[in-house]
Amino acid sequence: MSRTVFQAIADPTRREIIGLLSNQSCNLNELVSNFSMTRPAVAKHVRILSDSGLVRIEKRGRERYCHAQLEKLEEVVLWAHQYRRFWNDRLDRLEEILRKESQTK
């Protein structure tokens, strides 16, 4: 099943995993040590992140190392940017109205 970046980052645990991997790559056991959940639960989160393209898994011998692929978050940045513009425009208009109101008093 192909997952979107938005589905992947919807969960706080997955966002925390991305944060950890953005600083350094690590294997699954190292990731598990940062959470109070089972190895299979962390592995499921990593699989979802991998399906969305946010994490790349590299097999080295018996270990699987996880690497963040943060460029995939650009989709989220672009989506959020449209709302930043919307709210900036609204707040600029509100500031103008309040300024005019205070000048008439």
Image (cartoon, rainbow, N blue to C red):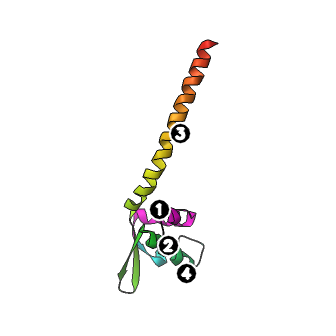
What amino acid does circle 1 point to?
Answer: Gly
Mark 2 and mark 3 lie on one chain; the one further toward the N terminus is 2
Which image quadrant: the C terminus?
A: top right
Residue 19, which numbered label? 1
Mark 4 and mark 2 lie on one chain; the one further toward the N terminus is 4
Mark 1 and mark 4 lie on one chain; the one further toward the N terminus is 1
Q: Nearer the viewer, mark 3 or mark 1?
A: 3
What amino acid does circle 2 point to?
Answer: Ile
Q: Which residue is mark 3?
A: 87
In the rendered structure, are the residues bearing label 2 and label 1 in contact, judged by CB atoms less than 8 Å apart?
Answer: no
Mark 4 and mark 3 lie on one chain; the one further toward the N terminus is 4
Q: Position of residue 60 (x, y in %)?
A: 35, 82
- Prevailing secondary structure of the magenta residues: helix
Crowding at dot 1, Cα within 10 Å, few <14 / some 14-19 / many 20+, comes out as few
What amino acid does circle 3 point to?
Answer: Trp
Please tell me whether mark 3 sits on a helix, a strand or a loop.
Answer: helix
Mark 2 and mark 1 lie on one chain; the one further toward the N terminus is 1
Please tell me whether mark 2 sits on a helix, a strand or a loop.
Answer: helix
Which residue shows up at 45% across the image and 46% down it?
81
Q: CA distance from mark 2 to mark 1?
A: 15 Å
Please tell me whether mark 4 sits on a helix, a strand or a loop.
Answer: helix
Q: CA distance from mark 3 to mark 1?
A: 27 Å
Q: Position of residue 57 (x, y in %)?
A: 39, 76
Nearest to the observer: residue 22 or residue 11: 11
Q: Which residues are magenta?
A: 1-25
